[in-house]
Image: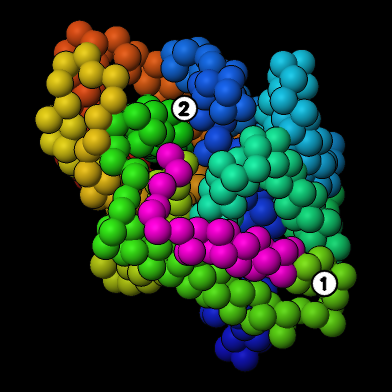
């Protein structure tokens, strides 16, 4: 490929315009997922008088664990369906439709419809999640050196959606009702589905049809060729690397996903959220900045995309434009409600914004790091991620050290939650987006959908363990302390991270030149 044609192909912020169509598609899906997840436990555990169902923390976290693990487990099936039956593009569209129905069902707030909605969301995620990443992998198959950067930019889209979803679904749940919070998630999932479907023409044909089946005679001939033994051993070693990284990924998500469970409970019951005077003014200024500035940046990217693709996918861009105008309207409404008040009551779900906000700010820096000559190897990145995660929980353990044993409420400074989310986000950037990139580089293209599914199986296991262990928060606080609870998630990730860094030479050898 000539230099000129390559430059034209990577014409939008040094990446393909198609990447940003997928960026915004994933953004709306994550809007729906994180927006709903932010109010999930709060709704189930809130008193009846506040519109909740008064479930115990253990029961609510148990259902959350089943849901969050299942949405990562079903991609194994979703990857197979796309590889063999539908192709990636149709699988993504069907998944988005199922999730739209799921959020709509949750909005009814009856037990049957709630469980039905969770079922739709699980099925939809299974079809959507592995296959949108597979499309990106296909777009960059000829440019493996750009995959880490592409997936990190894509991950910025993930967290842009998460940021907006938590910001607005949490606001509607607190100021109108939980039904409005769940319903808003469904509306933007529908718009995201339409934007993707009408914009699929610029995906270079990637994922438009199922992967071609390998001819059996070619497979037999390959096996009978003596030279095939060496490539076979290389691929075996690379599968081992994927397995090892997946194993340690379980430890990461088992701790990281406390954010939607025990850390949300901590923010609601043990964190100082009622602010007055200068503290309230400072919070309102900060809240306004983080509401407007990231949305402005994302809107700028949107305008860049319009300039590159409007003639090719005009309907997709129009739907995307309507979506963003709606978001701006909701943000201005939120600010008009909050700013005139003399005090500030921080919503318990608000702290989940911090993870997405830090991602938006830090993702470009990490993307540049991964593309530089100082790019660490896979196991070192994963090791750093786990260690940073553990240190974040160490900050919470220290902040919670003043809470008496068995206390049901407290007023711990919110600075410890902010610091924890910053460290957790840095750890996440070292592990999660590059994990997808390494899977795509270490496995054959014909197996990519299924292997993404297997990768999500490891994440599913971590999510299930997160809420299973998190469900013991009341027991551990009653018998020991809140600080002891967070120390569990401090020591285990740090130990796992150190092990990964120590085995780095072995891992590099097994990767056979893949970086």
Q: Considering depth in this image, is 252 or 259 the residue closer to the camera? A: 259
Image location (x, y in percent) of residue 496: 23, 32
Q: Considering depth in this image, is 132 or 282 the residue closer to the camera? A: 282
Q: Nearer the viewer, mark 2 or mark 1?
A: 1
Crowding around mark 2 (Cα neighbors within 10 Å: few <14, some 14 to 19, many 20+) is: many
- Please give the name of the residue rendered at 64% of the width and 82% of the height, measured from the top-left corner: 304
Q: Is residue 468 left or right of residue 204?
A: left
Q: Is residue 404 left or right of residue 73?
A: left
Q: Is residue 480 above or below residue 209?
A: above
Kindly state the secondary structure of the residue where label 2 is placed.
helix
Q: Quadrant of residue 185?
A: top right
The stretch drawn in magenta includes residue 335: yes
Task: For marks 2 and 1, give the CA distance.
Answer: 36 Å
Q: Is residue 461 left or right of residue 372?
A: right
**Label at residue 29:** none
Q: Are marks 2 and 1 in contact (CB under 8 Å)?
A: no
Compare marks 2 and 1 and give the one earlier in the sequence. 1
Image location (x, y in percent) of residue 329: 68, 66
- Quadrant that contains the C terminus: bottom left
What is the span of residues highlighted in magenta in the rendered image?
A: 323-348
Image location (x, y in percent) of residue 282: 31, 64
Q: Quadrant of residue 387?
A: top left
The answer to whether residue 19 shows anywhere in this view is: no
Residue occupied by mark 1: 318
Image location (x, y in percent) of residue 241: 39, 38
- Quadrant that contains the N terminus: bottom right
- Please give the name of the residue rendered at 60% of the width and 86% of the height, measured from the top-left corner: 7
Residue occupied by mark 2: 463
As drawn, which residue projects farthest toward the bottom?
A: 4
Crowding around mark 1 (Cα neighbors within 10 Å: few <14, some 14 to 19, many 20+) is: some
């Amino acid at each position: 490929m000539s230099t000129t044609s390559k430059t034209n192909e990577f014409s939008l912020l040094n990446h393909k315009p198609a990447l940003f169509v997928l960026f915004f598609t994933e953004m709306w899906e994550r809007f729906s997922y994180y927006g709903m997840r932010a109010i999930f436990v709060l709704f189930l555990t809130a008193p009846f008088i506040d519109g909740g169902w008064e479930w115990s923390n253990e029961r609510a976290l148990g259902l959350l664990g089943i849901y969050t693990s299942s949405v990562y487990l079903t991609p194994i099936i979703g990857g197979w369906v796309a590889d063999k039956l539908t192709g990636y593009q149709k699988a993504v569209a069907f998944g988005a439709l199922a999730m739209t129905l799921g959020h709509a069902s949750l909005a009814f707030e009856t037990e049957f419809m709630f469980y039905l909605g969770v079922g739709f969301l699980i099925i939809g995620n299974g079809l959507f999640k592995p296959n949108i990443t597979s499309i990106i992998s296909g777009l960059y198959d000829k440019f493996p050196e750009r995959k880490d950067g592409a997936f990190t930019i894509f991950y910025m889209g993930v967290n842009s959606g998460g940021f907006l979803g938590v910001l607005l679904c949490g606001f509607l749940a607190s100021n109108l009702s939980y039904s409005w919070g769940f319903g808003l998630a469904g509306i933007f999932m529908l718009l995201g589905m339409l934007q993707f479907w009408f914009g699929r023409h610029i995906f270079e044909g990637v994922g438009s049809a199922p992967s071609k089946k390998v001819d059996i005679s070619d497979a037999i001939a390959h096996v009978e060729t003596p030279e095939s033994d060496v490539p076979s051993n290389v691929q075996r070693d690379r599968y081992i690397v994927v397995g090892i990284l997946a194993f340690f990924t379980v430890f990461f998500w088992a701790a990281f996903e406390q954010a939607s469970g025990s850390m949300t409970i901590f923010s609601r019951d043990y964190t100082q959220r009622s602010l007055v005077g200068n503290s309230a003014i400072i919070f309102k200024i900060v809240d306004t900045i983080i509401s407007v500035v990231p949305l402005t940046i994302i809107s700028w990217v949107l305008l860049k995309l319009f300039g590159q693709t409007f003639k090719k996918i005009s309907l997709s861009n129009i739907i995307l434009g309507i979506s963003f105008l709606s978001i701006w309207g909701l943000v201005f409404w939120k600010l008009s409600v909050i700013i005139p008040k003399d005090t500030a009551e921080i919503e318990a779900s608000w702290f989940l914004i911090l993870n997405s906000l830090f991602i938006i700010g830090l993702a470009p820096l990490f993307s540049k790091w991964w593309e530089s000559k100082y790019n660490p190897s896979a196991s070192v990145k994963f090791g750093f991620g786990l260690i940073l995660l553990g240190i974040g929980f160490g900050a919470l353990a220290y902040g919670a050290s003043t809470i008496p044993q068995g206390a049901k409420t407290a007023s711990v400074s919110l600075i410890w939650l902010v610091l924890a989310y910053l460290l957790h986000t840095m750890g996440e950037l070292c592990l999660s987006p590059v994990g997808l990139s390494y899977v795509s580089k270490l496995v054959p293209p014909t197996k990519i959908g299924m292997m993404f599914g297997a990768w999500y199986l490891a994440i599913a296991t971590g999510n299930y363990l997160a809420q299973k262990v998190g469900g013991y928060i009341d027991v551990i606080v009653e018998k020991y302390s809140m600080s002891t609870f967070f120390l569990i998630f401090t020591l285990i990730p740090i130990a796992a991270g150190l092990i990964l860094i120590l085995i780095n030479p072995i891992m590099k050898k097994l990767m056979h030149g893949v970086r």
